[in-house]
Amino acid sequence: GTPLIFIVMAMRSLIRIWTVMTGTAFREGTAWEDMERLEIATYQMDLELAVGFQFYACLMFGLLCTSFLQHSRIVSTGRDRKYTQRYMRIVAYTAVQGVYAFVFIGVLRTIFDITVTYISEMPKYHEQAQVIQVKILDKVGTIFSFVTLLCMLNMFLISRVPDIANGLNGANPKFTSVRLLLLIAQIQPQVLQAITVGSTLYKTVSENVAKFHMEEEFSRWTFTKKQALLAHAAALNVECLIVGCLTWLLWRPDSKRDKALMMDLKADDGVAQAREVEDGYEPLLDA
């Protein structure tokens, strides 16, 4: 469902940035700067809402993995049921802490972004919001890109654990689309903004381009920040369609996977959980 939500919100944001690029956002009696600021703010809020649903999907992934690990059918820690449950609970939540950290920080960032965007529409606080946008949010975006990569690595490694891989009948391929969407939504806008005219990278390259006698070629680069916003929203529509098709392909009906997902591991100990025997735990699925 997350790719579909992204497509809807990306289309909305694409409409917003197009009204700015074509000038159709202009209204008589309203200053162009105010209309431009309103449309771009709405563009940002649409994408932040889509990202919020992405965090929810990651949270569900984390809880699913935690459940599989907490009720592991492979690890045996002895005959003390209470100690075993507490031990596996600690291991389960610790193993997925990269995903939980990403969700927690991401939700805080989304709330902060939406708040700053909303405040920026108030003439009284517009300048202060702009300062926060430049000094804080831009730097936080770079840091959050690293957190995103850490989350993707955590998802990749945890999906290889036998309990999860067997329970989901190949977890890594099935969550490839989720990792792709994480990478696209968080890294792509950072890359696009980095290559715009006036960016730090642009200034660094412009200072050294004379060494290669490419001043004329470099002067033809006119990629602006608004064009970067347009490129990001336009690319999201195509990318999310590909991710959605990939999700459908990898999550087609599978009786083995559905049985593992629907099994109530918290049911009666004699029915759904493992039975203690001399050599460890013996699954009791047909009790």
Image (spheres, rainbow, N blue to C red):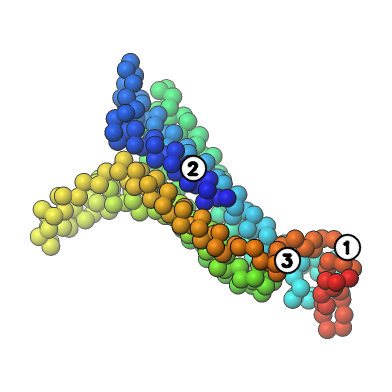
Q: Nearer the viewer, mark 2 or mark 1?
A: 2
- The residue tagged 2 is 8
Q: CA distance from mark 3 to mark 2?
A: 32 Å
- The residue tagged 3 is 260
| Residue occupying image coordinates x 70% and y 69% | 256
Viewport quadrant of the C terminus: bottom right
| Residue occupying image coordinates x 42% and y 39% | 13
| Residue occupying image coordinates x 13% and y 55% | 217
Task: Tell me: 56 left or right of 223.
Answer: right
Please state the horizontal and vertical placement of residue 135, each as a whole percent of the image: 39, 42
- The residue tagged 1 is 268
For the image, the number of numbered tags is: 3
Q: Nearer the viewer, mark 1 or mark 3?
A: 3
What is the residue that sits farthest to the bottom in this orientation?
Answer: 279
| Residue occupying image coordinates x 40% and y 29% | 38
Task: Tell me: 276 left or right of 63.
Answer: right
- Few, some or many residues within 10 Å of mark 1 (<14, 14–19, 20+): few
* Marked residue nearer the N-terminal end (1 or 3): 3
Q: Which mark is residue 164?
A: none
* Marked residue nearer the N-terminal end (2 or 1): 2
Residue 214, by quadrant, is bottom left
Whether residue 51 is visible to the viewer of this picture, yes or no, is no
Please state the horizontal and vertical placement of residue 68, each as a whole percent of the image: 71, 65
Amino acid found under the numbered disc labelled 2: Val
Q: Nearer the viewer, residue 106 or 192?
A: 192
| 134 to 92, vertically: above or below | above
Residue at disc 2, secondary structure: helix
Q: Nearer the viewer, residue 131 or 264?
A: 264
Amino acid found under the numbered disc labelled 1: Asp
- Few, some or many residues within 10 Å of mark 2 (<14, 14–19, 20+): some
Residue at disc 1, secondary structure: loop
